[in-house]
Amino acid sequence: DPVLALPSRQKTRIQSIVTYDGELSEAGSPMSVTVKLEDEIDLSRGDMLVSPSAPPEVSRRFEAMVVWFDPRPLELNRVYLVKHAGRQVKAKATLIRYRVDVNTLAHAPADQLEMNGIAAVEFETNEPLFFDPYRRNRTTGSFILIDPLANSTVGAAMIYEARQPSEGAVESEGRARVGSDQVGVTPPERQQRHGHRPAIFLLEGRSALAKQLERSLFERGFEVLVLEGDTLSSEALPLLLKPLWSAGLVVIYSSTAIAQANRNAIKALAADCAFDLALAADDREAVRQVLALTESLEIRSKDQRTVN
């Protein structure tokens, strides 16, 4: 297959995929493999091989939702280290756009971010990052912040979007121009684009089923993702869900155990589109139950969807 190397932007092809047990015809996450390329190109730790038809964003400026861990507040224009997808670059926060009230999910102006606080922050790095929005790819859409003096993790973040046009060949010619006279996208417009209303499904103790549901809904044309809750604090959960909800996505919230406070927060956000279900023990029957429920979310008729 053809691949694009980043940051060099050199194109080549995969000649073979090698493992300890021999060559493979294909490989996927989380396999560890050796890739032989047809051409000799320079690749270093943290570089990426991506599909030329679906490259990531490339930018030094971006907005991210940050959960702050350190007793000392986030300092604007101070140099931190960003650890992202195998790379480590220098970065500084240039603006705190707003703070999120974890109790009401309301946005409030803020000039600092304190311990256990959550805020939308704009960053600038000394080198371009290659990323996808978190809603599309949880691995390339997230990073951690490190204090370079203490060598301690001070925050975790999910990338929303670039704050300037992507650099180089990764910018698509069809991307809409953003001007001061444009009106923001409304929820009905997003729903019309997706073909469905947003929803949140609560799934307790069934991580394998969560992946099956994600695949089934994706194949039916839904914009869907799994949010794994075991590593999320109760303070971070509402913050993570609100932008996904606002973007019109169907979210499968999967956790070993869901606290009642989290259930209440989800229901307060999604109302009648929050599904806390007692599903069948058989996974295939459980999938059928959920698919039946999602019919109420559809906006387009079924013949407009891709069904496999």
Image: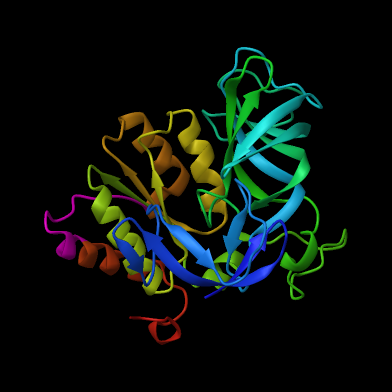
Front residue (pair 172, 251): 172
- 133 vs 205, left or right, is right
Does 186 appear above or below 98?
below
Does 118 appear above or below 228?
above
**Image point (60%, 47%), residue name:** 46
Q: Is residue 9 visible?
A: yes
The quarter of the picture where residue 34 lies is: bottom left
- 5 vs 142, left or right, is right
Q: Is residue 198 visible?
A: no
Front residue (pair 79, 121): 79
Spot occupied by residue 3 in the image (x, y as percentages of width and height): 59, 69
Q: Which residues are magenta?
A: 274-286
- 122 vs 116, left or right, is right
Pick out the residue farthest to the bottom. 303
Q: How is the image coloured?
A: rainbow
Please give the count of numbered marks on the rendered protein.
0
**Image point (82%, 67%), residue name:** 177
Q: Quadrant of the C terminus?
A: bottom left
**Image point (45%, 70%), residue name:** 16
96 drawn magenta: no
The quarter of the picture where residue 86 lies is: top right
284 drawn magenta: yes
Front residue (pair 155, 96): 155
